Image (cartoon, rainbow, N blue to C red):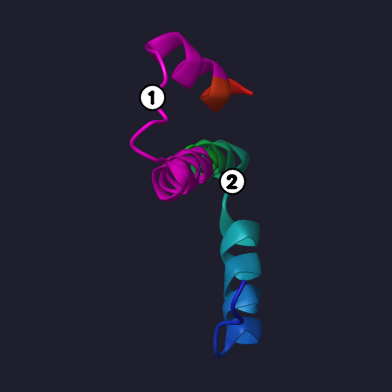
Amino acid sequence: MVPIRGSKLLRQKIHKLIDSLNEEELEEVWHFVYALYCDLYMIEAIEEVKNLQQPWNILSHEEAVRRLLF
């Protein structure tokens, strides 16, 4: 991970924001952030497979799903 310029200030702002949220808002934000994390994880996995795939590497639908899930 590349450090972001002013990341200390950003971290402080994020902590203040989290402290200002009530439990319902915090739970809603958490679900949203977790969904984004899962999407990013899948996109990275797909990109990795694209970079490694060769014309002779063809998977069936079941094999592809199995590799994504494990």
In the picture, residue 60 is in which quadrant?
top left
Please state the horizontal and vertical placement of residue 58, each as a whole percent of the image. Answer: 38, 24
Residue at disc 2, secondary structure: loop
> What are the residue bounds of the magenta stretch?
37-66
Residue behind mark 1: 58
- The amino acid sitting under disc 1 is Ile
The kind of secondary structure element at disc 1 is loop
How far across and down, in percent of the image, does residue 45 sit? 50, 42
Does 18 appear in magenta? Answer: no
Q: Nearer the viewer, residue 32 or 57?
A: 57
The residue sitting at the front extreme is 56
Residue 65 against residue 41 in the figure, above or below: above
Q: Residue at x 58, y 75 (%)?
A: 13
- Whether 32 is drawn above or below 2: the answer is above
Given the current orientation, which residue lies at the most extreme top position?
62
Checking the image for residue 32, the label placed there is none
- Which dot marks residue 22? 2
Residue 48: percent from left, percent from top? 48, 47
